[in-house]
Image (tube, helix red, strand yellow):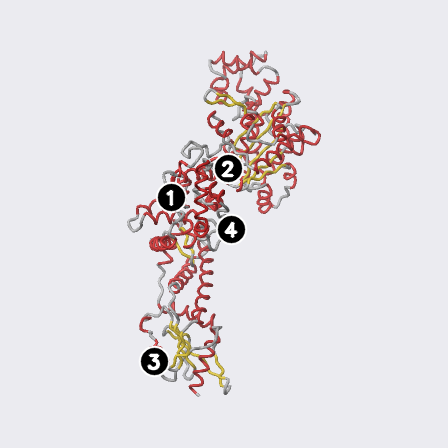
Amino acid sequence: MQIQNLFTRSIHRSINGVIKADQGDADSVWQELDEYVITRELDQHLRSFFESYLFALDHPQEASGRVGVWISGFFGSGKSHFLKILSYLLENKQVSREGESRRAIDFFQEKILDPMLAADIKRAISLDTDVLLFNIDSKADTSDGRDAILRVFLRVFNEKLGYCGDHPHIAHMERYLDEQGKFDAFRQAFADASGSTWEEERDAYHFQVDALATALSQVLGQEINDADAWVERFEKDFSLSVENFAGWVRDYLDKQGNQKRIVFLVDEIGQFIGQDTHLMLNLQTITENLGTTCGGRAWVLVTSQEDIDAVLGEVRASKANDFSKIQGRFKTRLSLSSGNVDEVIQRRLLDKQPEAKDELRKIYREKADILRNQLSFTNIGRTFKAFTDEDNFAAVYPFAPYQFQLVQRVFESVRKAGATGLHLARGERSLLDAFQSAAKAVGPSEVGVLVPLYRFYPSIEGFLEGVVKSTIDNAASNPSLELFDSQVLKTLFLIRYVDEIKGNVDNLITLFIDRIDADRQALRKQIEDSLQRLEKETLVSRNGDDFFFLTNEERDITREIKDVDLTSADEARELGELLFKESLRDQRKFRFTENGKDFGLNRMCDQHPLGNRIDGDLMVSVISPLVDDRETWSEQRCILESGQGEGSVLLRLEDDRDLARELRLYLQTDKYITRKNDGTLPLNTKRILQDRAEENRQRRQRLSTTVDRLLREAEVYVAGQKLEPKASSAPMLVEEALDYLAACRT
């Protein structure tokens, strides 16, 4: 059976994976309501919201401090969709499609099973409620400054009442005419005089001053010759403050009756505020004044990628202000977690037909042990989920459970690292969209196929910065690389900024598993070969066992580091430091216990003397894997060399494939950073150099550990004899060898 035939609904159907506050066409609204999934978590959030909302209705004297709702959730968690659903319910919006009309509440008759919650929602929507839903970033004007949030609130409020949104003083004039009961008459008089509607011309009324003067004179019963001056008076006298705004909202509600409510639903407020102290205070004051002035009849619901404490924490850290009041203004706090997204994707996209579930359960029973081994990670910062049982396998197939956690972190980390443009930062892509795209890619395949991580790359490809995208695109056309290399590069990019998972070969194998019975050993060989090619092209870099994707600037710096010249003496000197100063604790003397005589020590590394040689001192010589004529250092030669003259201690280290590469890169990086770090570099270059310095610190630690191990496991030759020392540590091994040498010389 093909994967695309497993599902209850076609995976190729159009799904509005990105919920936008300003998207209100009938088809989109219908799908948003029809396919909305009430998860266990959302059920609790709906209860919390409507409990608070109804409490304000029943206790108006206590409602003023409870009108703020803060909805938080990571990128793609569904907070915007939740906010929009609340707007539909509060308005009890009517929507039509293909001749059928339904109210918002009708879509939830079968979704909400608890009669108490259903009753609460019906009671709440029985009120006459105006809903103002908007994305604040799309409504704000960059020139609004400190009052940006207040001006957006006023703009959407004016637009709701039919007033001018772009020019507050024009709206103020319209409000004045409306209070006089003459606004409709003015609009008609203006249309008669100008031949155009007031709404079409008000933004550029200067071109219709005669018609404006005629209309104003007619409805106000006074001669107005200079319409420009009359409107300018409104602009001059217009004063915008939070108190005025709250008063206008109260007057509107009073005019509509005691049961009238108004709800401002603001998407992405946290991102808009950022670390701006004034904007946070602006939001606090608006919510506080609407609550007190309107007696709990005006509500403010906002969404943010961070919870309120995190947003305040950032502001406090930068400005050290006390924002305890705003926390009190948003008593209702709803946080959407990753578990909510998992459940939504499974129920909305991956729901299977009964016979398909049975087949998948059977496969799991037969392959459970294989799957456990296939989907394992090493050196990770969190526990990634595995399949728990046959039902879980049937629910999430063709995906693996860890992907719901990892892809979420990929989207978050890539956006925060700035590797994407503005669209992804604003939530232009959702996890639902990413999983649908990946599912469609494997749709024609037979059951047994799994989705590897690189299948998620197309979901963000169109939103990547040009330099990032071109790096990956160019790899596909590079004649020195293969198609598989491009997939490895995409995978390394996706996990580049995810701290919880390292790009080692074992983890890459797991991320590349594309069949239940995939051959891990064959994948290992394929991935290792690919990493060599990518590293040669300076598209990836290596830190120990971990590989990572290089950005353009990182790639330039990596190339420059590789071009730093070194001599064999440089490498031998540094290796000598690691051997003699660190592993052997910089021992300079040896006391022969049998006669108490002290000997000085001469030291050599790969035939290069370390320090001055003094006649009569004992010689300790190390032959490492880096020595030029390594293949000639056989056991016979080591015996001969150790027996020359007065004899010496010769330690022959075992081969180590990483030692030369790690030591050379350590020295090149250290030289490069010392030379380059002159204090005049751009911030981004400084950050990259700091990252390289930290990697080099870790590299030095690995080198020290490797050298110590090689010394402990070294072949030991003394005065023409091969010893079998009993010591377990490097210093004691050398002590034992020196003791034998001293005995030979006395």
Of badges 4 and 1, nearer the viewer stands 4
Disc nearer the start of the sequence (4/1): 4
Amino acid under label 3?
A: Leu
Amino acid under label 2?
A: Val
Q: Which residue is mark 4?
A: 383
Q: Who is closer to the viewer here, 398 or 210?
A: 398
The quadrant where residue 654 appears: bottom left
Q: Who is closer to the viewer here, 359 or 257?
A: 359
x and y percent of residue 276 in the render? 56, 40
Whether the residues at callouts 3 and 1 have beta carbons within 8 Å, the answer is no
Q: Residue drawn at (42%, 32%), measured in percent from left and top? A: 13
Residue 428 in sight: no
Find numbered disc 4 in the image and state the secondary structure of the residue it sits on.
loop
Amino acid under label 4?
A: Thr
Of badges 2 and 1, nearer the viewer stands 2
x and y percent of residue 651 in the render? 40, 75
Q: CA distance from mark 3 to mark 4?
A: 55 Å
161 versus 137 height, above or below: above
Q: CA distance from mark 4 to mark 1?
A: 30 Å
Q: Which residue is mark 3?
A: 640
Most extreme residue toward the right is 61
689 versus 613 height, above or below: above
- Count residues near mark 4 (Cα–Cα under 10 Å), then give few for <14, some for 14-19, many for 20+: few
Disc nearer the start of the sequence (4/2): 2
- Count residues near mark 3 (Cα–Cα under 10 Å), then give few for <14, some for 14-19, many for 20+: some
Q: Residue drawn at (45%, 80%), measured in percent from left and top? A: 738
Q: Which residue is mark 1?
A: 469
571 left or right of 104 in image = left
Amino acid under label 1?
A: Lys
